[in-house]
Image (cartoon, rainbow, N blue to C red):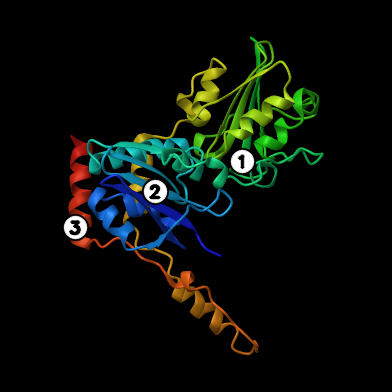
Amino acid sequence: MGHRSNFVIIQNREINIYYSHWGAISIPKDIFYGPQITIDYIKSLQPVETLLDDLWCEGAVLVDTHEKQLIFWGGDGYEYPAVRKYFISLLQLNWEGWGIRWAEQGIIDIAQYLRIDISQVQTDIDYYHWKNYRGWLENSKTDCTETLLTVKYHPELILDYRFDNYLTELLSTGSSLFELLQSCDPVAIPDEEKVCSGAYLNLFEKEIWVWWGRPTDERVVSKILRHWDGWTVKRHTEGLPFQVELSGRSSDFIRMEAETVIEQILDDITKNDRFDPRKWIDTIASNCVNIEYADIWINPDTLNNSQPEITEREKQQVLQRIIKLLED
């Protein structure tokens, strides 16, 4: 159990890799206050020799002080492209002059930047990234949905479908997907923050555009292509609004309001709700007082839960400056 993550600092041309057992979930909070606080925090973590692979790594940060580049992914709720876009805009205020990007392929992007052979961090694509069709379609029954498909049958007929199936699961069916969709009811397009992944399929041009909120290996795009002989498969990173625009429709009615997203991000950043592994272990122990165990071993990394050293006053000063800049 954990939120395993890697942190990398490139300083004076030297590469140092660090590990955090719980750090992935709090990455947005931990990098928000600028380069120096982030670097000091990373250096407080456990040094390691290698990166985690894409199965175990749930978040990562790379800070290159020479090239002024920040690459990251992680946090709960930041998988939506709209949230990431506004978060990066806010980060830019504290990381002035830096290039900042979200790692669309997760730890693979970090390895590529470090010029490490990416096979060292890639696991079996069929085990982690790829889901084959299970034999039935799951219409989305909740407010949020896993996948939205937009199909352009012809210029006058564009339909949208919501599913709890994974995107790769649906596209693993190849062109027989269109037969499966005949038994499905089209839906109204949900708001962009309620969809995790999607695809636009243009039947006449034999073109597919795919996107994911979660980091996804580029090998997945190549594998989708093998199931769609004669089609073109492309990937984008702009989320649901771009999918809607590809079909020739306006995306204004599904986009998140900038003020709402920024308020949501700042509320998350300022919350003092970091996970405390010691409290978690105490809770487990208190519920197991009547159970006898011959041998109990706890991974030492479980207790490591470093966090950036920044006072509440410093936080408020940074936040007030950001709010003033946004108002101006």
Q: Count every numbered label the image shows and give the total.
A: 3
Q: Which mark is residue 145?
A: 1
User: Relative to 81, does residue 152 appear above or below in the rendering?
Assistant: above
Q: Amino acid at mark 2?
A: Val
What residue is drawn where x is 76% and y is 22%? 175
Tell me the distance, in whole angstroms, between the alpha carbons under discs 1 and 2.
Answer: 28 Å
- The answer to whether residue 259 shows anywhere in this view is no
Q: State the SS at label 1.
A: strand
Q: Which mark is residue 61?
A: 2
**Quadrant where the N terminus is found in the figure:** bottom right
Which amino acid type is shown beneath numbered disc 1?
A: Thr
Secondary structure under badge 2? strand
| Mark closer to the observer (2, 3) | 2
Q: Is residue 191 visible?
A: yes
* Label 2: few (<14), some (14–19) or many (≥20) C-alpha neighbours in 10 Å: many
Judge left or right: residue 223 versus residue 177. Answer: left
Q: Estimate the x, y position of residue 307 in percent, counting from the top left.
A: 33, 63
Please give left or right for residue 87 compared with residue 12 in the image. right
307, 203: nearer the viewer: 307
Of callouts 2 and 3, which one flags the residue occurring earlier in the amino acid sequence? Answer: 2
Q: Secondary structure at mark 3?
A: helix
Q: Do labels 3 and 1 touch, CB within 8 Å?
A: no
* Nearer the observer, 116 or 275: 116
Residue 295: x and y in percent read 62, 85
Q: Amino acid at mark 3?
A: Glu
- Mark sitting on residue 314: 3
